[in-house]
Image (spheres, grey):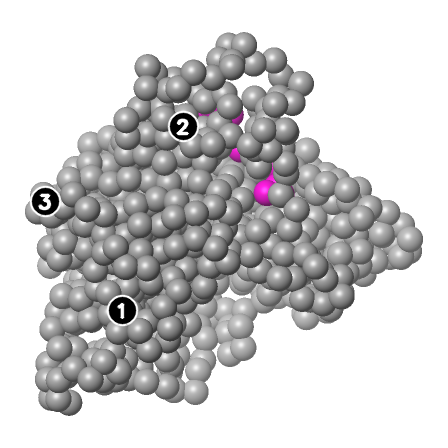
Amino acid sequence: MLTIQDLSIEIRRADRIVRPVTGVSLEVARGETLGIVGETGSGKSMTGLAVMGMLPAGGSITGGSIRFDGRELTELSATEYRGVRGNEISMVFQDSMTALNPTRRIGEQIAEPLQLHRGASKRAALAAAQEMLALVGIPRPAERMRDFPHQLSGGMRQRVMIAMALICEPRLLIADEPTTALDVTIQAEILELLDGLKGELGMSMLLVTHDMGVVARYADRVGVMYAGRLVETGPTSELFSDTRHRYTHALLASIPTLEQDRGHELFSIPGSPPDPAVQQPGCRFAPRCAAVSASCLEEFPQSSVARHPEHRFSCWNPVDGSVAEIQPRSLPFPAARTETEPKLRVTDLVREHAVSGWAGRGRSVKAVSGVSFEVAAGETFGLVGESGCGKSSLGRMLVALDTPASGTVELDGQVVSGLKPRELASRRTQLQMMFQDSNASLDPKMKIAAILREPFAIQGIGTAAERTDKAVALLDSVGLGPGILERYPYELSGGQRQRIGLARALALEPKVLVADEPVSALDVSIRSQVLNLMRRLQAERGLSSVVISHDLAVVRYLSDRVGVMYLGKLVEVGATEEVYGAPAHPYTAGLLAAIPVADPEAARQPAAERVRGELPSPLDPPSGCRFRTRCPLATEKCATEEPLLDAVTNSHQVACHYPLQRTEFISTRPATRSEVKKP
């Protein structure tokens, strides 16, 4: 269906020429899914955009061929390409919010390709759009046709993007990171939907992602890209079981898993990907490779054949091991200090947001509804749950950026949630937050030196020279050198910016650090570096931490205890090993079942029932148990009685009428799971 041969792309900027893709060759057969993986900047998305004829301004194909069903796409005029794009080849973009027109109703946007490419009438196109919305699993499609993009959840917007891409029944679908910003539950639904529709419509698919677990489950073959080159490709099972290229091997070793030994570091790839504007001879992975030789620095290796004839790689010093044989370099962490009294105590915290506008008069979003927990000195407490469950709202209240409607936050026994601004300013040194978007949280007009000196200046600590010395020491603590003090945030990589965010949060030596999705926007290799750094600094400084994330593997690695949130409430709390090893709430079990596994054989085995359906609106949460509308065990009792947190073991609590795990520590309930009758 698609053949790319020796594709090279360059983008001319005012001050330099960037070469994001060099000599890439790949094929996608009819009905096949080819997964393309690699870090940010590897050329994955640019390859897909080249197939679509949508290179950015200044971009051009400088060499090679792109043939679609025997037709040379690089020779098409702009008018001819418009007949292919969206009709025979479609693309699902990474960010559905920016890809959809915010001023047009979604029904019109889905119908438009059918009108342009097939000459359908407006009425016929809208009817087909409604059918497509139903096909992609949108509830009440007739009502949703008149919605605007901002009225839909992230998962529903992504489904709308898929409906728009498939309305003309294309023969090739390019899915560019289609689930990156989505929760694990919605991600699983979207990927299953794409896989099922591919079979129904007889499509081929190019799946672009940095998630090795996704390609293990859904791709027939995999191509691994690094710095603009394809370094390894082959059938999915062969590539995972007989990994040959050092970069592929390192990528697989860097993935946090639920089986990760929490007492040891994650494996991480040293350094960062090269600048695509700087060309170097030899293998571009050489500066980060543990087995570099003279040949690696002189010449890019030719393609070699592995044990399987369709498995090829380009590496001078290939590895010879399976995923199971990967042994990450590890060092034990020092034991964290512990005390008997809790450092942070949260009691019955409530936060509601009034809805603006005439339509929302008198209504409020129930963001957090009566949450209570404690964090001991030196302990890390993890908060997990889907987007919209109230995790970030809770985190902002912990550091007094938001004021609760009721309830208290206590630090060392003193209530900080109701302090006056002047009193709060002095306590802020002890409560700090690491934000999700490091780019947005760093002032783009300030150099790194000024950003790191600012907390000391606000608190009146030290002279100008002493503040600079402290800034240098902070950089050293997060693994960065003083050379970046005079740079601006935009001149740093994502991993470097996240380290700066951590350094600034630690500047005043806080007692409690709240980290909100600290690595969600980072590649797997850079993510491992930041996670290792957080674990090390937490242990060395005896920090109490609250880590907020929808990535369950990240939370398991960082946390001593974990709380699972659903629609503003804690539904399960306990020691990390207990909650992950024996989840008691159906929601927790469903979240764990939806995690993609970077093992093709395990990923394609039947799994436990995962969470399905959309998160209910926090404007009007369900009565009784808020999870009941998505729970396979729900009964009439769940609709009328709200379950309270009850003991599973001495260190494990669950709010469920019919918990999955029961021991002698559980108080007596009216019914056991075996007595539950499904409605």
Q: Earlier in the sequence, mark 1 or mark 3?
A: 3
Q: Residue at x 24, y 36 (%)?
A: 260
- Residues 614 and 275: in front is 614
What secondary structure characterizes most of the magenta part?
loop
Looking at the image, can residue 640 be seen? yes
Instruction: Give the residue number, with chain letter if any, for mark 1.
Output: 427
Q: Residue at x 46, y 59 (%)?
A: 404
Q: Residue at x 30, y 45 (%)?
A: 374
Q: Earlier in the sequence, mark 3 or mark 2?
A: 3
Looking at the image, can residue 238 be seen? no
Q: Secondary structure at mark 1?
A: helix
Magenta residues (range): 607-616
Amino acid carrying label 3: it is Ala
State how far apart marks 1 and 3 are (Cα).
27 Å
- Residues 477 and 114: in front is 477
| The label number, if any, that marks residue 646 in the structure image | 2
- Residues 502 and 651: in front is 651
Percent position of residue 318, x then y: 20, 44
Q: Secondary structure at mark 3?
A: loop
**Residue 550 in the figure: left or right of residue 77:** left
State how far apart marks 3 and 2 are (Cα).
30 Å
Instruction: Give the residue number, with chain letter if any, for mark 3.
Output: 335
State how far apart marks 2 and 1 are (Cα).
34 Å
Q: Residue at x 53, y 52 (%)?
A: 367
Task: Tell me the quarter of the picture where residue 327 sits.
Answer: top left
User: Crowdedness of circle 3 by 10 Å Cα count: few (<14), some, many (20+)?
Assistant: few
**Residue 410 in the figure: left or right of residue 50:** left
How many numbered circles are shown? 3
Task: Tell me the quarter of the picture where residue 275 sits.
Answer: bottom left
